Image (cartoon, rainbow, N blue to C red):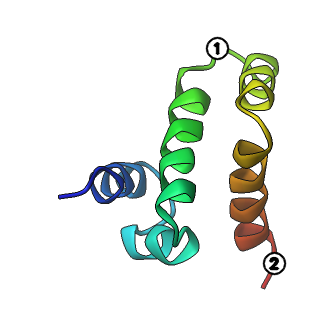
Amino acid sequence: MPDFARAAREIAGESVFTHLELEKLYKSEEERAKFVEVQKVLKEAASVNQATKRVLEMGEEAVRVLVKLGRYCLTP
């Protein structure tokens, strides 16, 4: 099973998202890899400030991944 599929199943098990929703939302391998990295950073961060700092250090692609997820969650 590819890394993203395994990670998406784990994340879906811990969140409101299904594995299929995550696969549909992140189509390219680069986006999927960055999503998994961002999820790890968020999970390991001790505070919101630390999470914010670490995501910003990851660069623009990490922010895009979060924006895409936010739009999916917050728009009908």
Amino acid carrying mark 1 in the image: Ala
Residue at the limit of the structure toward the bottom, as seen here: 76
For residue 55, what is the image quadrant? top right
Q: Residue at x 76, y 54 (%)?
A: 64
Q: Which mark is residue 74?
A: none
Question: Number of marks in the image?
Answer: 2
Quarter in which the C terminus is drawn: bottom right
Measured as percent of width and height from the top left, residue 10 is found at: 33, 49
Q: Residue at x 79, y 57 (%)?
A: 67
Measured as percent of width and height from the top left, residue 20 is found at: 40, 76
Amino acid carrying mark 2 in the image: Thr
In-front residue for pair 16/56: 56
Measured as percent of width and height from the top left, residue 27 is found at: 52, 72
Dot 2 corresponds to which residue?
75
Number of other residues with Cα within 10 Å of mark 2, as a class: few under 14, some 14 to 19, many 20 or more: few
Dot 1 corresponds to which residue?
46
Judging from the image, what secondary structure is the residue with disc 2 in?
A: loop
For residue 39, what is the image quadrant? top right
Above or below, comparing residue 10 to residue 71 in the picture: above
In-front residue for pair 48/63: 63
Measured as percent of width and height from the top left, residue 29 is found at: 46, 60
Q: Are marks 2 and 1 in contact (CB under 8 Å)?
A: no
Q: Residue at x 72, y 52 (%)?
A: 66
Judging from the image, what secondary structure is the residue with disc 1 in?
A: loop
Number of other residues with Cα within 10 Å of mark 1, as a class: few under 14, some 14 to 19, many 20 or more: few
Say whether residue 28 is left or right of residue 74. left
Q: Residue at x 35, y 49 (%)?
A: 7
